[in-house]
Image (cartoon, rainbow, N blue to C red):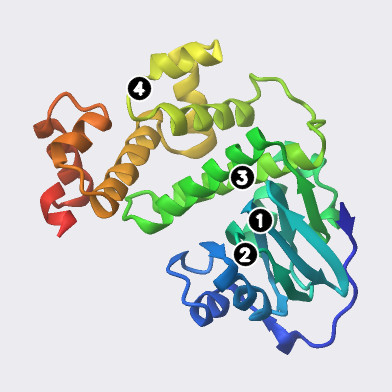
Amino acid sequence: MYIIPTKHKSMKDFHNLSNYVASNNIRDCFGAMTAYIAANKESIGKLINGIKYVNFYSLILVVDGFLELSVNDERILVEQHDMLRLSPHQRVDFITCSPEYESEQLFLEAGMYKDIIHNDENLYHATPPQQLEQLLHISLSESKASELNGICSQIQKTISHPHLYKKEMLEFLIHLLLMFVSEVSSGNKVEPMDLKHKENIFKIFMHLAANHFRQERQVNFYADRLNITPAYLSRIVKEVSGNTVYGYLSGFVYNEACNLLKTTDKTIGEISDELGFKDQSAFTNFFKQKSGLSPKSYRR
């Protein structure tokens, strides 16, 4: 469903992403580029009513329950597995939500959002300029909602942990996110859909890597599933992103290692096994190379 926004009063009423993040004490943020928060019944009203007008994009995935809000004076009901994209310069007001309400919410700087689309020929042709100014509300299947949840989770992990290539990782995860939004909003009619197209190969590689990085870190594994040669996959990933296959895989491993060290009481040996290292020593050497700290020191 698309709703065309109306004209608004004054630019002084608009909130930029940095100010919004600061005023709402959002911890998972990366400069003025992107931010993430998991919202519930207690927090969503403040998050919505705290902005009124925004000059950044906001993407909401309802995980449980429902949310009712007003966008430019039109009431919108957002239910479980629904995706809602709020565009800049829309007036947003919270109305109510169910007691069990939970959602994933991403905030994306408007200039970066538009630049990614304009620099990707497929996305540019699949996204009419006027659509970028409209509210987007889509009911997803359970599997598609799970896919979007996975992308949001990976963005959050990349934001929250130190990483040598954090900016580059976030740019390409957000690129992946926008390709997902384009697909679901166009009914999978984006053209062309040739798997050998560079951006599509990269997208599928990122999906595979996010699901298999714990145990599979050889180029051959991913190339086999794409039905291309390892050399061709390596060349495409480098050409599209400037990073390498191993660079992305080790980044996923490092982010997950940081997450497990900080949020679980698993032993370092257990984490090493879970992430597919041959022994604890190999894991420790990998982690120290990435962070400059031993896993034990990082956990303190």
Alpha carbons under labels 1 and 3: distance apart: 23 Å
Q: Which residue is mark 2?
A: 99
* Location of residue 106 by image quarter: bottom right
- Count of numbered badges drawn on the protein: 4
* Location of residue 266 by image quarter: top left
Disc with the residue nearer the chain's start (1 vs 3): 1
Q: Quadrant of the C terminus?
A: bottom left
Disc with the residue nearer the chain's start (2 vs 3): 2
Q: Is there any visible trace of residue 157 in the rendered image?
A: yes
Circle on res. 177 = 3
Alpha carbons under labels 4 and 2: distance apart: 41 Å
Q: Which residue is mark 1?
A: 65
Q: Which amino acid, mark 3?
A: Leu
Disc with the residue nearer the chain's start (1 vs 2): 1
The image position of residue 253, as x and y in percent, is: 32, 37
Callout in the foreground (1, 3): 1
- Dot 4 alpha-carbon crowd within 10 angstroms: few under 14, some 14 to 19, many 20 or more: some
Disc with the residue nearer the chain's start (4 vs 2): 2
Alpha carbons under labels 4 and 3: distance apart: 23 Å
| Residue for point 45% across, 34% down | 210
Q: Which amino acid, mark 4?
A: Glu
Alpha carbons under labels 2 and 3: distance apart: 28 Å
Alpha carbons under labels 1 and 4: distance apart: 36 Å
In the rendered image, the residue lying farthest to the left is: 281
Q: Which residue is mark 4?
A: 216
For mark 2, give the secondary structure: loop
The image position of residue 225, as x and y in percent, is: 51, 14
Label pair 2/3, CB-CB below 8 angstroms? no
